[in-house]
Image (cartoon, rainbow, N blue to C red):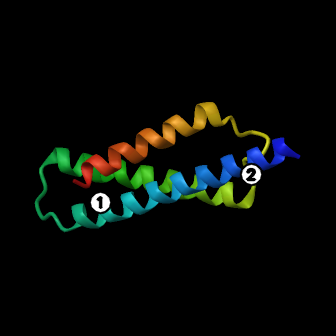
Amino acid sequence: MAETVGLAASIVGLIGLAGKLTEGCIYLRSFFEGVKNAPEDVQLIYNELEILLGASKAIETRLEAGVLDGMLQEAEFRPALEQCVRTVETLGK
């Protein structure tokens, strides 16, 4: 029982991280969309945001649907999501 509660809490936390990442990507994407005649490095950041946004939405959807249950290795998964969130937050400053 305690193990199930722990897993549920982990999944809820990961859903929150994925949601935060998705929101940050959407915010930054809207910012970069407004840059006219952007230099190549800005275009590259925009392209990477598009890829990251798609991945974060897919992760969030799968977590909410419970599709990743049993495959979830939080020790490997959480640090990657946290690093992505930190990077998006840094870009947003």
- Can you tell which mark lies on residue 54? none
Residue drawn at (26%, 55%), measured in percent from left and top? 92
Instruction: Using residue 5 as the reference point, say whether residue 46 is left or right of it.
Output: left
Identify which amino acid the numbered label 1 is placed on: Leu
Residue placed most toward the observer, 34 or 82: 82
User: Cβ–Cβ below 8 Å for labels 2 and 1?
Assistant: no
User: Which callout, 2 or 1, points to the residue nearer the camera?
Assistant: 2
Q: Position of residue 82 (x, y in %)?
A: 46, 42
Q: Secondary structure at mark 2?
A: helix
Instruction: Using residue 67 as the reference point, say whether residue 75 is left or right of it.
Output: left
Q: Position of residue 12 (x, y in %)?
A: 65, 55
From this view, report whether residue 84 is shown above or below residue 67.
Answer: above
Q: Secondary structure at mark 1?
A: helix
From this view, report whether residue 71 is shown above or below residue 12.
Answer: above
Q: CA distance from mark 2 to mark 1?
A: 30 Å
> Extreme front residue here?
2
* Quarter assignment of residue 70: top right
Residue drawn at (16%, 46%), measured in percent from left and top? 40
Q: Position of residue 32 (x, y in %)?
A: 23, 61
Identify which amino acid the numbered label 2 is placed on: Ala
What residue is pinned by disc 2? Answer: 8
Residue drawn at (56%, 39%), measured in percent from left and top? 78
Ranked by sequence position, the earlier of labels 2 and 1 is 2
Residue drawn at (55%, 56%), measured in percent from left and top? 16
Q: Position of residue 30 (x, y in %)?
A: 28, 67
What residue is pinned by disc 1? Answer: 28
